[in-house]
Structures are given as C-alpha cells and as structure tokens.
Amino acid sequence: MFTSNKATAQDYSDDWIGYFSYLNIKDVSQGDTKVYVAADNAIFSYDKNTNEIITLSTIQGLSGETITNINYSEVNELLLIGYDNGLIQVYDEYNQTILSVVDIVEKPTIPQANKSINHFNIVDDNVYISTNYGISVYNLEALEFGDTYYIGTNSEQITVTQTAIFEGYVYAATGTGIKRGLLSNPNLIDYQEWEQIIGFSWSGVEAVEGKLFMARNNRRIYEYINNGFQEKSFYANSIKDLRAFDNQLIVTTESELNVYNSDDFSNVAHVVATADFDTKFTCGLIDASNSIYVGTTGNPAIGKSGFGILKTTINDVALFDEIHPDGPLLNDFFKIKIESGHIYATHGGYDVYFNPYTVSNSRSGVSHYFNDFWQNIEYDSILEIASNPRSLSNISIHPNNPNIAYISSSISGLLKLENNIPVQFYNGDNSTIQPFFTVNHFVHASTFDSEGSLWVMNSRSDYPLNRLKDDQWTSYSFLDLIDPGTNNQGFSSIIFDDNDNMFIGSHNYGVINYDINSSNFNHISEEEEGMPSTAVKTLTIDNNGQLWLGTDKGLRIVYNTDQFVNGEAEVDNIVVLDDGIARELLFQQYITDIEVDGSNNKWVATLDTGLYYFSSDGQETIFHFTKDNSPLPTNDILDVDIDDVNGVVYIATDKGMISYKSEASKPQVTLENAYVYPNPVRPNFNIISDKVKIRDLSENVNIKILDIEGNLVAEAETNTNSRFKGYNLEIDGGTALWNGKNLGGNIVASGVYLIMLNDLDTFETKVLKVMVVR
C-alpha cells in the first residue's frame, strides 16, 4: 500500500524556453481528437483536425526524467505519464496543470531498478500500473493509490510488462509467465490468489472484442483459446508494442507495424519503413478514420535520428507524413556555441578523460538553430566528405560570418560547415592536424583570435597547436613542456585575453600559456601552485581581464594574467562566508563551463549540482538553479553560452537544452542605439514583475527618470545600482530595468516620463521618452 504523496508541478514558461528533441518516440496514445506522443523526456499533442502541435516539457513542469509510457483518459481529460524512475505525472488538459505522484519513487522497499513504469491500463476510473515490481492500482477520480500486487513466488517483486482485463480476470504478462487474478477477489494482494497459466517470458497481453492475445519474447503472437495457446503470427524482430482499438489488434516490431482484425486475425494493414524514412518503429496506433500513427526512433550505431511520428492510412501504407515539433537532432547535448543569433550544438563528444569511444551518440550530426528554426546537419551528410566523422565536440563560429562553423572531431579531424553544408574535413592529409594513431586525430578545443585566425588543439600530438590563417596551416611543438605529446590526454579550452596572450586548458598539465613568437611556456598545474587538479575543464577571461578556470575539483582565478605571462602566476580560490564560516566556493566541484555576462557576473556549470550564477567577484550567489527549483532536466550541466545581444543564457545538458531570460546584455560602445520598451507601457503589462527595459546602454552610465514636470522619479548608476539588490531602477550590463516605482516606492501615475542617459566616461548624453498608461 502506498501513501498519497503528490504535488503540483511549477510552470516556468515566463522566463524559460525549452529546446527538446521530439524525433525519438517512446510511446503514443490518443483521445477523440488528439494524439499524444512521448519523446525521450517531453510530450507533444497533435490535433487531428487542425494539425496543431502543442509541447509539454520541463518548462511546463515535466520532470525531465526518461519517459517510459503514457496513456490518455478521454473521460477524465487526463494524460498519465510514467517514468523509468517510478515517477508518475498526471497532466490535466483542461486546467493545464501537472500533478507529480512520487509514491513509487519514495517507496524504500522497492529497489530503484524495479520502479520503472511499464504500462498504464485504464479501466473506468482505475489504472492498473505495470512496473518492474508488480502491479499497482491507481484511482483517477480520487488521484490516489489503491492496492499493490506483488505476484512473484512468495510475494516476490517481478517485472510486469502489461496487463489486460478479460472475462472477469486481470491478466499480467511477466518475465516468468502469464498470470491472472479474479477481479472480484478482494484478496488479490495475496500472491497465492494469482494463477500462472503458462511459463516463459512475455512482453505483452491485450484483450480485443472478447479475445485475448499475448506477445511472447520469442517474437510470436498467441491467442488464448479454451485454456490453451494458439500461435497467430511470427515476426522477424522482437515485438515492441501491443495494443487494441475497437476490434483491431496493433502489433509493432522494430521493422513493421501490423493491424489485425480480431475476428479472423486477417491483416488490415502492414506498414514498413521506406527508403525516405529509414528508421526503427517503437509503437503505433490506429484511429476511427483508419489513420495509423507510428512512433519511430533513431539508430545511434549508424547515426540515424528518428522521424517522430509517421502518419499513414490503411489505403496507402507507403505514403507517410512526418509529425513532430521543430527541434534539435538529439536531447543529448555536448557543446553549444552562439554567434549573432546562430546556435550550433554537438551531441557526440567524449568522456571526462577525452575518450571518444565510451560515449553514446558518437555518430551524430550537428544541430543548428537560427531565426526560431532548427536547420540540422544529419550525420549522413557529413559521411559524404569523411569516412568516420565521429565524436563531434567543440565548436568555433566564424566571427565575421556565422554561417561558417568549425566542428572538432575526436576521430576524423576538423569539420567545416558553410550554410549548413559540410564542405571540408581537415586532417593529416590536408592540414597540420595529425592523427594519434591510424585515423584518430583527437581534435578538441578551438577558437578565433582578434585577427580572424582559427586556432585548433590537436591532442596527443607533439605539435598540438595549429593555426589556420589565410588558408595556410601552421603547427607548434609543445615538446619543451609535454614530452612525448601523448602524455596529455586532451585540451579543453584555448582563449586569448585583450593583449592576445594565449591560455590553454589541458587534462594533465593544468593551464598553459604559450608565446608563439618566443616559444616560451608558462603553466600551472600542481597543488603547491594553488591548483586543485591538473585537469582543467574550462577557461574564460572576464571583463576585468581576470582568468577564471574550472577543474574537475573546483574553481580558481588568476587575477593578474600579466604575472602569469611573466612566469609569476598566482592562483587563488574564492573564499565565502557560509553562516559565518569561511569555505571555498565550489569546493571539489566538477566545473564544466564558466561564462561571463554583460554585468561581469559568472555563470558556472557543474556536473551533479546544477548551474550557479555568481556576482562578478564570486562572493554572492545570485541564483543556484537545480532540478528542484528550475526546469533543468538534470543537474549535470555540460555547457553554457550567452547571447550577448539579449542576455539570454543557453544551458546544454544530456537531456535537452533550455534557455533563461537573464536580461544581462552586453554593453555598447555608445548610447546611440539606446531604446526603451515596451513603449507605451499599457495597463495589461505587469510593470512590477516584467519591468520596463532600457537597452543598448554603454558600459558606465547614470540614468535619471523624470516626470514631465522635471521631478526625479528614479535614478541608477552602473556598479552602484546593480541588479538583484532591490532597487526600483537597476542596471545589468547593457540593460536597465525599471519596475515602475518612484523614489517613495509607489507605482507611478499615467503619463510621459523622460529617461536621461549620461555616459560617465565619454559624457555622451541621450534622452528617451516612455509613456505609462495605468
């Protein structure tokens, strides 16, 4: 018996946007007018009459965990969502709310491996939930659990894949046989009241119009007749899904979907993949209009993505419509990079030791987002110019042409994309990039310098530093520091400061400074030098020229890079007070990325503990986003990047990408393009929470807001009235935010207000006007 533990999930759509892939389908269900589709960890609905698609993700309150099963109740207008960790969420379509039911998750007597939700069988107001421990009954009217049946020998927990109600019995397909219990029996919690009618391992059981069909793990369908079993069909692949609609049985395998008339088991429809949709099937259904909806999934072994839902009809099963929301190739993000509104993302990557062979999705393409649309580069298209373009990782976008991007591959070298077309692969045949062995080039970090030259790190090489300038390649030896070159497993970062000093993050040699003119090295890696680890995972230079570095065991800062270049590097940690006790900030945390926003504040990504937003000096934690207080699908953050134009922060995980509207845009050189919005401020605008924005400010400004009579309403100054300090008017990088209140803390009256901008360095001034309508 479970206690009732549930909570309403929070909707984060005001400040967050989700970018999830809907190509690989886990399950599908339907109501009278809609089809509901579960992808990896997000949902979409498809309106069969209007073709409208609506998405549900962590932004609306989904958990972000891996979905295993869904089922929609038309009568209750509820969508049940089951997860591999035992969580159940109930989406109320009418009220657009999501209820999280955590009873199974929190049940200590059930091992974690046994909590997966395998199937929902809705019978009137009761739901028979098949799990890896047995069967639980959930009431949709009361939204609470009833009995739980542990039906293994001696009440052991056994995997139940599916249930069906037939002739007064509940039948259960298990890994050890087909079992049944009499529904009218008030003592079904006693395992001895369950009868095993046959042994072996079964993947499904379904009742259709007075008949009972069962799917066995030997790729066969049987009908249960007169207490015996009659084989009805054999398939080339294992059965993935078994379900009924009206008098029809739908059987889905990896390679085909079959619809049978249950009366005589005649084949109504036989659906197979076509050349244009070369994919694997996962599930399927048919509706009253004889439209068939087939769930698909990709094949990572050959770099194929799924196609979402393929819609066809029994009249022409070779003609497909592809149905899914726009999205990236995969949810498994590795690196992202933003330039001029273009977002490029990779999915393959490497593990924490720079090994590309231990990761999933090593054969995957590049996802490219621009103008609110995904323009993805499939792995197949890259194969046309390279034999093994696996483990795509680091990204550099051309600073003068964001339609050109360079993508590192740990196997084949360096990929050049132009207008989403793979045009070149640089390797040992046409560049100074050299393989470690055979075709394995281990290309990792890259960046552009201020002159437009591309610098590329070629790991496990004696000449790991490579420059592409004016179509000419040059390489530089690191043997004076790393001898042999194979002693270092990988290079995570390469960056330049404002003086064009080069800093490189390495796995085994800490932070390296290299001067190409003198061939001199400086590096810091040892504990006695202040380093918590030799493995540097990320580097960045902040707006004050300070070098921030993240390792697999904590955060460090080099406040004076000139000293580093002169061979006198001083490495510091950040000490903060926690309830009056001094402690090291992010002690022993695995840091994956550090990004600097327009206010010089720091976004720090970690494995396991989420995303941090610190003040410029790290002394104040402004935000700490985790799965519990944000729509992050996981606390493992793999990469972060910031759109400097609008301050939006993009967060990449292995369960999807989301963005946060931070408003901290990059300051401009002048006030020439400064503007205010919304303008006018209308009565339906929530000025207190959404705030009036003054954008494209210069780096050091004073702002005065006056009423039409010249009375001071609000005032702010850069570095004084910073954001999150409680000011009515606050400045965050190149953006100021006003909550509509005056110096007395009252919301201003309707009228025209003057915004006086004054650059404190150049004495440039500008006056803006905004109308407030209450």
Image (spheres, rainbow, N blue to C red):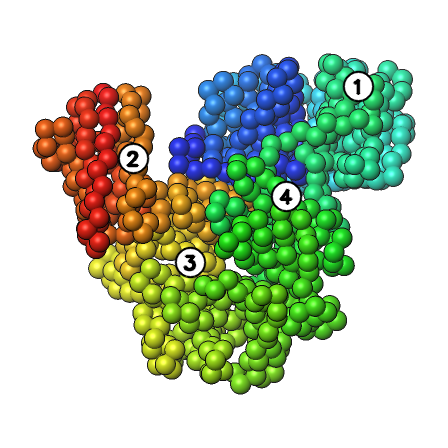
Label 4 – label 3 distance at C-alpha:
26 Å
Mark closest to the chain's N terminus, 4 or 3 = 4
In x, y percent, where is residue 730?
23, 43
Q: Secondary structure at mark 3?
A: strand
Q: Is residue 552 above or below residue 385?
A: below
Of residues 165 and 689, the one drawn nearer to the viewer in this rendering: 689
- The mark closer to the camera, 1 or 2, is 2
Q: Amino acid at mark 2?
A: Val
Residues under numbered marks 4 and 3 in contact, where contact means CB atoms less than 8 Å apart: no
Residues under numbered marks 1 and 2 in contact, where contact means CB atoms less than 8 Å apart: no
Q: Which mark is residue 594?
A: 3
Q: Is residue 31 visible?
A: no
Q: Which residue is mark 1?
A: 248
Q: Which mark is residue 376?
A: 4
Of residues 256 and 678, the one drawn nearer to the viewer in this rendering: 678
Q: Amino acid at mark 1?
A: Gln
Q: Is residue 738 visible?
A: yes
The residue under the point 48% across, 70% down is 504
In x, y percent, where is residue 22?
62, 36
Q: Quadrant of residue 80?
A: top right
Q: Amino acid at mark 4?
A: Asn
Mark closest to the chain's N terminus, 1 or 2 = 1
Q: Amino acid at mark 3?
A: Ile
Mark closest to the chain's N terminus, 1 or 3 = 1
Q: Crowding at label 2, few (<14), some or many (≥20) Cα neighbours within 10 Å?
A: some
- The mark closer to the camera, 2 or 3, is 2
Q: Which residue is mark 2?
A: 676
